[in-house]
Structures are given as C-alpha cells and as structure tokens.
Amino acid sequence: MKLNLTKAGTYTITGITQNQMNAMSTILNTANDRCFNEPEPNGEYYSGEDFVCVLEKEEREALQVVCKAL
C-alpha cells in the first residue's frame, strides 16, 4: 500500500487490500455514526463515548498497515 500526495494537494492510496479497506471503513464509519454528534461551546466535537468496534485479526493487522502509511 502506498499513500501519495498529488500536485493538486490531494492524497491517493494505491495497492490497498480488501482487509485494509474493511478495517478503515469499519473504524471511520463507526466514528461517524456514533461519535462527534454535537459541538461543544468552543466549537470542537468530542466523541462523547468510548469508541467501540470489532475487527477480525486480518483487519486489525491491515489497520496497522494503514496507520503506518498515514
């Protein structure tokens, strides 16, 4: 897996496996669905709860690869 910064200032990920995509999707979607609902008076968003999800062993390992690349 490789993370690239384009000339336009965007990022591309190439060579991502299905397990890596599943791990990233699970965590990002869980955070989006369960956390950061209402802004605090200072305008910042807090999760407001423990962040909980389940990953299979292969997905956990894939997550470590994703985080290392990021």
Image (cartoon, rainbow, N blue to C red):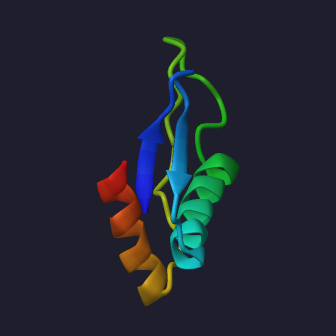
Q: How many marks?
A: 0
Q: Quadrant of residue 62?
A: bottom left
In this rendering, is residue 16 above or below 28? below
Q: Residue at x 51, y 70 (%)?
A: 20
Q: Quadrant of the N terminus?
A: bottom left
Q: Nearer the viewer, residue 37 or 21?
A: 21
Q: Nearer the viewer, residue 45 or 16?
A: 16
How far across and how far down the image is residue 30, in percent? Answer: 62, 58
Q: Quadrant of residue 66?
A: bottom left
How far across and how far down the image is residue 29, in percent? Answer: 65, 56
In this rendering, is residue 20 above or below 40? below
Residue, far front: 7
In this rendering, is residue 25 above or below 41? below
How far across and how far down the image is residue 56, in percent? Answer: 49, 86
Q: Residue at x 60, y 71 (%)?
A: 22
How far across and how far down the image is residue 60, in percent? Answer: 41, 77
Q: Residue at x 54, y 14 (%)?
A: 43
